[in-house]
Amino acid sequence: MTQHWNVAENYIKINEMPFYWRLGQSSESVPGIASTLPIKIVIDDKYDYLRFKPNESEWANIERAYQKNENIGFVNPESGQLHTYGSSVNNFFLNSIKKYNPVSIYEIGCGAGFSIKFLEGNGWKVVGVDPSEYSLKWSERLNFKLINDFFREGILKRSADFIYCNDVFEHVREIDIFSNLVYESLGSNGVFCFATTNSTRSIAIGDISMFEHQHVNMFTEMSIHLILRDAGFSDIEIQGGSYGNTFHVTARKSPAGLEMPLPDTGVSCAGYFQRASQKIKAFRKFYNESEKLNCYVPLRSIPYLATVGDFGRCSVYDSNESWRNKYIDGYSSSICSVKDVRFLPNTRFFVGSLTFYDEIKNMLVKKGFAPSDIFSIEEII
């Protein structure tokens, strides 16, 4: 049997995994952008988080994808996320802005600009920063102010009172440099506010479902504290989002010499590669023993499918109706929806999402599947 992954003391690598950066109308790839890439995960020893370690060729491929006018920004009318995840983060940003009452506000990685328009509708002026053609097109369509470039030193013409970002912190290759740059771009007592993925539970059990080429960072609460404290921030507050498994974070620019105490979270990346190796082996056994296997939440199932060399054999399902009949690059089967779920005997479901597992399992049971035929990675041993 071909080994599609390998693990060592200081890394885990999947040799080939579909590159998720858009939802396409067909399985045809885009010239110049690979449909599959390897993914190698290491531990950042200084800040204790998991990092995707791309080589320069792989990173160049990712950056080419960022430049395209594609649906890599989820929060737009076609995403199906506007009134669920989008509403959760927008209300978080609005409440934080109301608390600190800033004048100059910037959103880094503003994508389609719907957080900007939401805040404008509530009386706040925001300038977006985003390098993509995608963002430029939406700024012209919705008429919001955009700096169409990467966030870098000197790009803001004045010190900011408030900088926020959504689904950016996990995408930045050198997160310590980025955090320092945000700190330097803020004025006295300025506030940094962001939403990012919470990988704490997955790291604790050895889950690989959060592996994604664009998500180069996978954080615990402790790692975020370490990164922000090292950049100079204080008054660091981390809470869970109201939708999905996310961190909502606020931090203030500290007076010189002020040091924040660290929380006692008890979760570390130590031993993660050994835990992940056990989970992958358990999934392979489960996969080979399943007469017919469907997967729910394709983005979270694909890392596991890649470890067994499955690039389209399993049917993949998602509750987001806007994803129906779309394709993820590198996976030859289109995405099915709840409407397509039909009970078939001798069929198992693997649910890739830990966050929505109970909700999805209850739906599948109502469709006629036995609870004993529905699994998360926590139940596969």
Image (tube, helix red, strand yellow):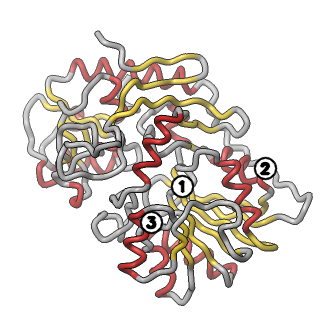
Mark toward the start of the polypeptide (2 vs 1): 1
What is the spatial separation of the Cα atoms under label 1 and label 3, in whole angstroms?
15 Å
- Marks 2 and 3 in Cβ contact (< 8 Å): no
Q: Residues within 10 Å of mark 2 (few under 14, many from 20)?
A: some
Q: Secondary structure at mark 2?
A: helix
Image quarter hosting the C terminus: top left
Q: Which residue is mark 1?
A: 196
- Out of 70 and 51, give the one closest to the viewer: 70
Mark toward the start of the polypeptide (1 vs 3): 3
Observer-side mark, 1 or 3, equals 3
Q: Amino acid at mark 1?
A: Thr
Q: Which residue is mark 2?
A: 230
Q: Is residue 199 in sight in this rendering?
A: yes
- Out of 70 and 47, give the one closest to the viewer: 70
Q: Position of residue 195 (x, y in %)?
A: 55, 60
Q: Amino acid at mark 2?
A: Asp
Q: Secondary structure at mark 3?
A: loop
Q: Which residue is mark 3?
A: 111
